[in-house]
Image (tube, grey):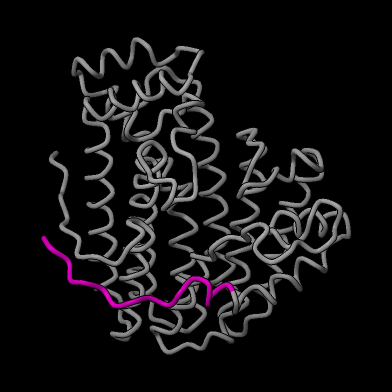
């Protein structure tokens, strides 16, 4: 199946320009020490609270806001009317980032020390909690559909927490399957994407069938995105991604390509299993590991699954009652999120 070439989407930078002023206002209204931590986390200030020069640190791409705003426009809503929802989605997203950095003991995010590593675990936890509370407060500023919107955020937060718990549980298990991993990805990676699309439609007064179709599209998009990220971590181009490769391998994280390779029952997969727990993981070792993963078929499995779920996401998008302009915009955003470019995608459905 070949998908049509999508139209050029709204730049995520345009979504950030719309959302960031309100986001700054909300964050600035938090308890002062928590506001300072969050302002640093968003890239707006330095650790001492002074303003960060433009471009010193990224504040995120606001991808989820871009999806929310596009979904709202697609059903006749205005950006101003749904802006509190876009702010709420960004607040929830950054709550997860602050907490994930603690859970994963990550020392760096977006090229700078993480909040917990500078301000301590206790303050970083509270800062994340403050962002989550502020997200619910933001939804109260929306007329009409605030209850349904809050219910969707409730469901999303529960899924995010469940996904994090499952991921921690899997980390201690010797036997983990690709299906196990995909269930975690559906909660951790898909839940906020489907929330953004559904929230945009709900706040703009869309029909339940359109909300359902957009949420289904978001669920598949999140899995496609996670699978693509896993491939990118091992074989990505630094000039394109801005991130060093093989960080997951260095930490012995069993991502999708790794699990597919380990479960392949191939000679390369068996060799990979025999050396996987090696403590010394220098660049030469990681080069060997990435080669074994590819030889065992891990890369191709992850790429096929990513394309398959992107295809399913686009199929559900077609079922939503959107304007054609918005449909093309969201179509292109989906492709950019997963592939980093607008392109004709030949969808390969994995065999059973």
Identify the residue shown where x is 38% and y is 76%.
9
- For residue 303, above or below residue 343: above
Whether residue 41 is visible: yes
- Looking at the rendered structure, the number of numbered marks drawn on it comes to 0
- The residue positioned 52% from the left and 56% from the top of the image is 156
Image coords of residue 304 (percent x, y): 22, 45
**20 within the magenta span:** no
Q: Quadrant of residue 232?
A: top left
- Considering only vertical position in the picture, is 328 above or below 225? below
Magenta residue span: 1-16
Q: Which quadrant is the C terminus positioned in?
A: top left
Is 6 within the magenta? yes
Q: In which quarter of the image is the N terminus?
A: bottom left
Q: How far from the left and from the top, in percent, is residue 192?
A: 50, 58
Q: Position of residue 110 (x, y in %)?
A: 60, 50
State whether residue 113 is above or below residue 327: above
**In the image, farthest residue toward the right:** 32
Majority secondary structure of the magenta segment? loop
* Towards the viewer: 249 or 26: 249
Residue 132 visible in rendering:
no
In the displayed structure image, the side of residue 171 where residue 135 appears, left or right:
right
Q: Position of residue 329 (x, y in %)?
A: 35, 77
Q: Is residue 85 left or right of residue 173?
A: right
Q: Residue at x 43, y 53 (%)?
A: 190
Quarter of the image for residue 263 reads top left
Residue at 24 percent across and 65 percent down: it is 343
């Amino acid at each position: 199946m070949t998908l049509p070439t999508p139209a050029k989407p709204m730049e995520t930078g345009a979504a950030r320009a719309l959302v960031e002023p309100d986001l700054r206002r909300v964050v600035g209204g938090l308890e002062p020490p928590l506001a300072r931590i969050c302002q640093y986390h968003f890239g707006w200030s330095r650790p001492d609270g002074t303003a960060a020069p433009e471009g010193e640190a990224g504040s995120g791409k606001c991808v989820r806001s871009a999806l929310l705003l596009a979904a709202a426009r697609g059903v006749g809503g205005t950006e101003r009317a749904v802006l509190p929802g876009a702010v709420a989605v960004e607040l929830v997203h950054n709550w997860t980032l602050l907490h994930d950095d603690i859970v994963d003991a990550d020392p760096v995010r977006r090229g700078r020390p993480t909040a917990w590593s500078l301000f301590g675990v206790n303050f970083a936890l509270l800062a994340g909690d403050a962002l989550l509370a502020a997200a619910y407060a933001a939804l109260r500023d929306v007329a009409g559909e605030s209850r349904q919107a809050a219910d969707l955020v409730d469901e999303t937060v529960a899924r995010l927490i469940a996904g994090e718990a499952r991921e921690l549980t899997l980390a201690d298990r010797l036997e983990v399957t690709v299906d196990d991993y995909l269930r975690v990805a559906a909660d951790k990676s898909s839940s906020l994407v489907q929330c953004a699309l559904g929230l945009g439609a709900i706040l703009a007064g869309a029909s339940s069938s359109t909300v359902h179709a957009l949420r289904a599209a978001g669920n598949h998009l999140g899995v496609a995105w996670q699978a693509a990220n896993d491939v990118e971590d091992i074989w990505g181009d630094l000039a394109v991604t801005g991130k060093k490769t093989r960080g997951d391998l260095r930490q012995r994280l069993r991502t999708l390509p790794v699990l597919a390779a380990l479960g392949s029952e191939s000679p390369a997969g068996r060799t990979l299993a025999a050396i996987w727990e090696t403590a010394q993981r220098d660049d030469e070792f990681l080069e060997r590991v990435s080669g074994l993963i590819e030889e065992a078929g891990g890369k191709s499995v992850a790429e096929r699954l990513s394309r398959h779920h992107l295809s399913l996401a686009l199929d559900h998008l077609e079922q939503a009652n959107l304007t054609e302009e918005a449909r093309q915009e969201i179509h292109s955003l989906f492709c950019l999120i997963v592939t980093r470019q607008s392109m004709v995608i030949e969808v390969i459905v994995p065999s059973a």
